[in-house]
Amino acid sequence: MFAYVNGAMLDETSAAVPVFDHGVTVGDGVFETIAVRHGTAYSVTLHLARLVRSAAGLGLPRPDLDELHRAVGMTITANPGIGHGALRVTYTSGSGTVGSARGGKGATTVIAARELPPYSPVGT
């Protein structure tokens, strides 16, 4: 699978974020999970609008919605054949210090794709 990381499409095995990214160290970020069915991402506009609202609630820099829409499309294109899966859109405050203060070096954006087993209610 391929993942979008800060403007680049990378093989997920080589995709990386810095170890002091505040999404990793202090959970300073937001995410959305977007359903993918037969190569189509669903309700993208609604999910990305909620991500922007959530980011504002944490005082994160405003994500570029146009870029996020392009990145979702790029990620779907780079991962053809997902019959039943999801995209995880993660947006963090980026690299910072070892404490809770933000580093001010720019946000981190990651969009990763994953094939998932179809939902099966318990007991069926």
Image: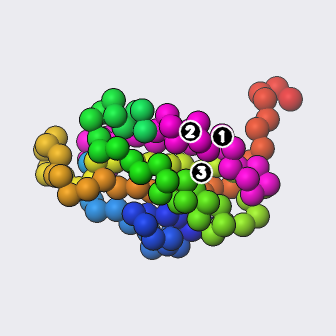
- Residue 46, magenta (yes or no): yes
Residue of label 2: 47
Front in this rendered view, residue 95 or 64: 64
- Residue 26, magenta (yes or no): yes
* Badge 1 element: loop
Please give left or right for residue 67 compared with residue 73 in the image: left
Marks 2/1 in contact by CB < 8 Å: the verdict is yes
Amino acid type, callout 3 = Leu
- Outermost residue to the top: 123
Front in this rendered view, residue 17 or 70: 70
- The span picked out in magenta is 23-51
List x then y, in percent, for residue 12. Answer: 51, 68
How many discs mark residues in the rendered view?
3
Residue of label 1: 43
List x then y, in percent, for residue 121. Answer: 78, 29
Residue of label 3: 87
* Badge 2 element: helix
Say above or below: 108 vs 78. Answer: above
Amino acid type, callout 2 = His
Picture residue at 76% right of the left edge, 49% below the top: 37
> Which disc is residue 89 wearing?
none
> How many angstroms separate mark 3 from mark 2 (CA)?
11 Å
Q: Residues within 10 Å of mark 2 (few under 14, many from 20)?
A: some
Q: Residues within 10 Å of mark 1 (few under 14, many from 20)?
A: few
Say how the picture is coloured: rainbow
Please report whichever mark, 3 or 2, sits nearer to the chain's N-terminal start.
2
> How many angstroms separate mark 3 from mark 1 (CA)?
12 Å
Amino acid type, callout 1 = Ser
Please report whichever mark, 3 or 1, sits nearer to the chain's N-terminal start.
1
List x then y, in percent, for residue 93. Answer: 28, 47
User: Which quarter of the rendered picture does the N terminus lie within?
Assistant: bottom right
Picture residue at 42% right of the left edge, 32% below the top: 53
